[in-house]
Image: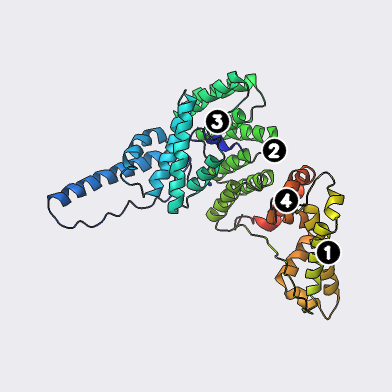
Amino acid sequence: MLDRVITSARLSTGFRSGDRKIKNLKRQSFLVFLLLANLGALAVAQASTHSSDQEKRQKAVALFNQGKRLEALPLLEELVPKYQQDAELLVDLAASLIDHAATLSDQEAAGKDRLRAQELVNRAWAMGNPSPLAENLRQLLSEMPASGAIKFSENPAVEQIMLAGEAAFSRRDFDEALKDYGKALELEPANYAAVLFTANTYDRENDFSKAAEWYQRAMKLDPNVETAYRYYADMLAKEGDMAKARSMLIQAAVAEPYNKIVWREIRAWATINNTAFTIVYAPIPVPKKDDTAPISSAWRAYHSMRADWEKGGRFHQQFPQEAGYRHSLPEESEALSATVNVLEKLKRDKKTADVVAKDPIAGLLVKLQQAGALEPYVLFSLGDDGISKDYKAYRTKNRAKLEDYLDKFVMPPAPGR
């Protein structure tokens, strides 16, 4: 996953709610100091020190929120050793170190900055920092190479130009950054990072028309990377176009459904639009042997089909190239279809129709079947390590069906839109 590749201030952290584009994040109040034991000279000196530190903290946070992370860095470096339990400061310092790393020509030194940022974020996480920035940084830094090094291209010339572009971006020299990305694209037209970073740089300059053009180019270049969709959604939200932002986030989820950053962004979109995305889930009960309730026959149909796949050889018939068994999309879909078939029969019988109508699991499964959405449901809601292996092949042929499922079942429109 690219997602700004932990290079500079290009970290999306939840819909203007924690990254370089943030403007309205509600910051936690400053550390509450212990009451001084007396009012003597020592107390006065300590109060003065605390007051000075509070002013520095406020200044550091303000610079950070303005995207001036390199300017905030010295203040954060001074404050963090004194207030190592201040999780917010730890995360801000980590993000600022990532910006600083992008300005270094020595990639070994840059890697050390990123590894230090990783350690800071992990400490903040252990303290319970729930911010989108902390969550995203933790995920992205955990995917970083052990050396902390970042690579944009196998072409050494393109690599150097991209590093120069990221250094310029971190210095907020956006014109220079655009020149560098342009040079990289002359040598390597299909470099996704160069296209994406060009879009995001125009976004940063508030040139939304050009940014939109370049985001769309990135989507076309690789429609199965979520980053361009998500960053475009972020920009659209800034412009107030929540409906189109929603559409972009749906496409981001289809591109990379098992990427938690996408769902954090969707959660943030829902929050600012006074709604919530729906967790669609229909857990199939395991009926007891002596359970004679009519609806239990539907649940038995599910478990019987699952057993046939796992132990009856169905899996190896479907996937002869795979050595061992795994949970799969065809298995789960067939098992759920068998369940729905029984439920439909029960619905047609006057004696049992009311039982099916009152059961929420049965109702949801029937609704999914009628909408032709059982397979998307399986992939999005039940996508374990086995099922997720079937996602790419399904997406290739059924992208529109996946988007339709998210539109109708998962991500409701903003109220009044």
- Res. 370 in view: no
Say which mark, if any, is on residue 386: 4
Instruction: Find numbered disc 2 in the image and state the secondary structure of the residue it sits on.
Output: loop
Distance of label 1 from label 2 (alpha carbons): 34 Å
Q: Earlier in the sequence, mark 1 or mark 2?
A: 2
Name the foreground residue: 173 vs 119: 119
Amino acid on which the number 3 mark rests in the picture: Ile
Label 2–label 4 contact, CB within 8 A: no
Circle nearer the viewer, 2 or 4 = 4
Label 1–label 3 contact, CB within 8 A: no
Q: Earlier in the sequence, mark 4 or mark 3?
A: 3
Instruction: Find numbered disc 4 in the image and state the secondary structure of the residue it sits on.
Output: loop
Instruction: Find numbered disc 1 in the image and state the secondary structure of the residue it sits on.
Output: helix
Quadrant hosting residue 59 = top left
Quadrant hosting residue 188 = top right
Amino acid on which the number 2 mark rests in the picture: Pro
Figure check: 188 above or below 229: above
Label 1–label 2 contact, CB within 8 A: no
Q: Given the current orientation, which residue lies at the most extreme bottom position?
A: 351
Label 2–label 3 contact, CB within 8 A: no
Name the foreground residue: 174 vs 355: 355
Q: Which residue is mark 1?
A: 338
- Res. 306 in view: yes
Q: Which residue is mark 2?
A: 223
At which x and y percent is residue 412? 64, 57
At which x and y percent is residue 306? 79, 61
Amino acid on which the number 4 mark rests in the picture: Gly
Distance of label 2 from label 3 (alpha carbons): 22 Å
Binning the other alpha carbons within 10 Å of mark 2 as few (below 14), some (14 to 19) or many (20 upward) gives some
Q: Earlier in the sequence, mark 1 or mark 4?
A: 1
Distance of label 1 from label 4 (alpha carbons): 20 Å
